[in-house]
Image (cartoon, rainbow, N blue to C red):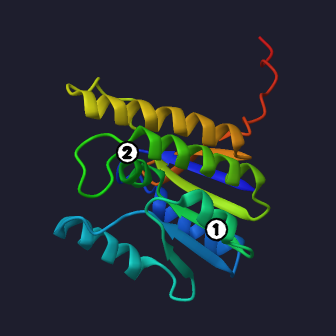
Amino acid sequence: MRTLLIGGARSGKSALAQRWSTERSADVCTLVTGTESDPEMAARIAAHRRDRPRHWRVREEPISLGRALREETSGLVLVDCLTLWISNCLWPPNSTDIDYAVWRHECRDFLEALTKCKLDVVIVTNEVGTGIVPNNAASRVFRDEQGWLNQSVAAVCDEVFFVTAGLPLCLKPAPAHTATPPR
């Protein structure tokens, strides 16, 4: 079962992903993509570490997410999150230029690995396209790449949930439609 949780910042995606992962398997490996780029990000990462069950396996993988997914051989894999991963690939450390070559390669590799993965996978990502059009090119590139990736991952996943206010709304499989009520 491949599950995608998508929502805005602080929507409850990660907490829900952790809860569902714990409920689905005692053997969980979380692939984390965030890096300690500044003190605020370091504090966020520390909070995630505190919240995560101690018996989970943790693998920090900021770039090669497809390879990391292929290397997992048991249990459930929690990927948290695709949004930071895109940033890491598009703007590698010590670079100010967008690296489309790295991003395209890593994106294809991840989608291929996800398609072939036999393990349960829970994936966290952000919805960044529902706001205003950003006023700079780099932000527009990021928004576009995030949107295209989210569509591709959703197509591969068995179930997709939009999370807001900590509540999941099932997008896929689509909820069963009821008959039109009689008049």
Q: Is residue 43 above or below residue 167?
A: below
Q: Nearer the viewer, residue 37 or 177?
A: 37
Quadrant placement of the N terminus: bottom right
In the rendering, at what x and y percent does residue 151 appear? 58, 34
Q: Residue furthest left?
A: 39
| Residue pictured at 39% horizontal, 73% vertical | 48
Q: Residue furthest top?
A: 183
Q: State the residue position of label 2.
A: 90
- Nearest the viewer among 94 and 157 is 94
User: For the residue labelled by badge 1, is the local secondary structure a helix, a strand or a loop?
Assistant: strand
Please indicate whether residue 85 sits to the left or right of residue 21 in the image: left
Circle 2: residue type: Leu
Give the mark nearer the N terminus: 2 vs 1: 1
Query: Neighbour class for label 1 at 10 Å: few (<14), some, many (≥20)?
Result: many
Are dots 2 and 1 in contact, CB under 8 Å?
Answer: no
**On the rendered structure, is 86 left or right of 94?**
right
The mark tally for this picture is 2
Instruction: Give, as a three-letter code, the residue at label 1.
Output: Val
Q: Taking 182 as reference, is 76 above or below it?
A: below
Q: Position of residue 126 (x, y in %)?
A: 43, 45
- Identified at 77% across, 28% down, the residue is 177
x 69%, y 64%: residue: 70
Instruction: Name the residue rendered at 55%, 59% in the picture.
Output: 65
Left or right of residue 46, residue 102 in this image: right
Q: Secondary structure at mark 2?
A: helix
The residue tagged 1 is 77
